[in-house]
Amino acid sequence: MDEWLLILLAVGGFSAGFVDAVVGGGGLIQIPLLFSAFTQHVPAVIFGTNKIASIFGTATAAVHFAKRIKFDLKLTAVGALFALGGSFLGARSVAYLDPEVARPLVLAMLVAVAIYTFKNKNFGTASDDELVEGRSAYIRLGLIAVAIGFYDGFFGPGTGSFFIFLMIRFLRMDFLRASATAKVLNFATNLAAIGYFASIDAVLWQVGLTMAVANVLGAITGSHLAIKHGAGFVRKLFLVVVVALISKMAYDMM
């Protein structure tokens, strides 16, 4: 592998890991980079390699958050199982439906998420007393995990952002707790996707593992800053990433 290409992939992996650890959206950086670096490969190989690079960073961020942020591990583990199943079903559905048909709907949803978050200044600042708990929390998170897990396996862009938004909206978490929980759920969806892509030999293992090292370093840095600066910092970066996703998807549709 060319030395300069290796450095570029490492920088991209670090940047993606940093962003993904805080609010999701690392694919915005890694996927275009992989497409431009490996033009000879079909999209499935690019997406599979991206998942390999991402899952290590996601796991690192999840562990980093779990040590420092108070969130319900049992509830999160149950949600992860639902996300795993949803992602597997989503990946299988690609064989029957064209994921691109979802692009206009996803774009409209991202615009709605951005507007809602921007207009509601207190969104994502809930206290412990406001958290949804008990059976209702399990039902709500289970539905969110299955739906977004399916979406991640089927299409993918903005998965972390959708997880965070929906957990704040329907479980009344703050941005920091929602981001921590999203890391675990996103790990599950990535695991299911890797299982699918590996089974069809659609992974560049050397590239993916090389980027994974940089992704882990970025995830450590991103999760540290998120914990240090709190929900306000996460909210701002969340809006930046959602706007970037909107811009990218709108450009692709032109």
Image: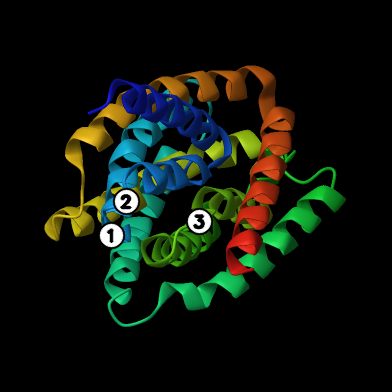
Label 1 crowding class (10 Å Cα cut-off): few <14, some 14-19, many 20+? few
Counting the numbered discs, the total is 3
Could you tell me which quadrant the N terminus lies in? top left
* In the rendered image, the vertical position of residue 108 relative to residue 45, given as above or below: below
Quadrant in the rendering for residue 152: bottom left
The spot of residue 237 in percent (x, y) is: 68, 35
Label 3 crowding class (10 Å Cα cut-off): few <14, some 14-19, many 20+? many
**Residue at image location 19% in from the left, 34% down from the top:** 206
The spot of residue 53 in percent (x, y) is: 32, 37
Identify the mark at residue 42; answer none if there is no mark: 1
Quadrant in the rendering for residue 76: top left
Quadrant in the rendering for residue 30: top left
**Residue at image location 27% in from the left, 53% down from the top:** 40
In this rendering, does residue 89 appear at all? yes
What residue sits right under mark 2 in the picture? 46
What residue sits right under mark 3 in the picture? 157
Of residue 102 and residue 23, the one placed in the foreground of this image is 102
> What type is the residue that disc 2 sits on?
Ile
In front of the other: label 2 or label 1?
1
- The mark that comes first in sequence, 1 or 3, is 1
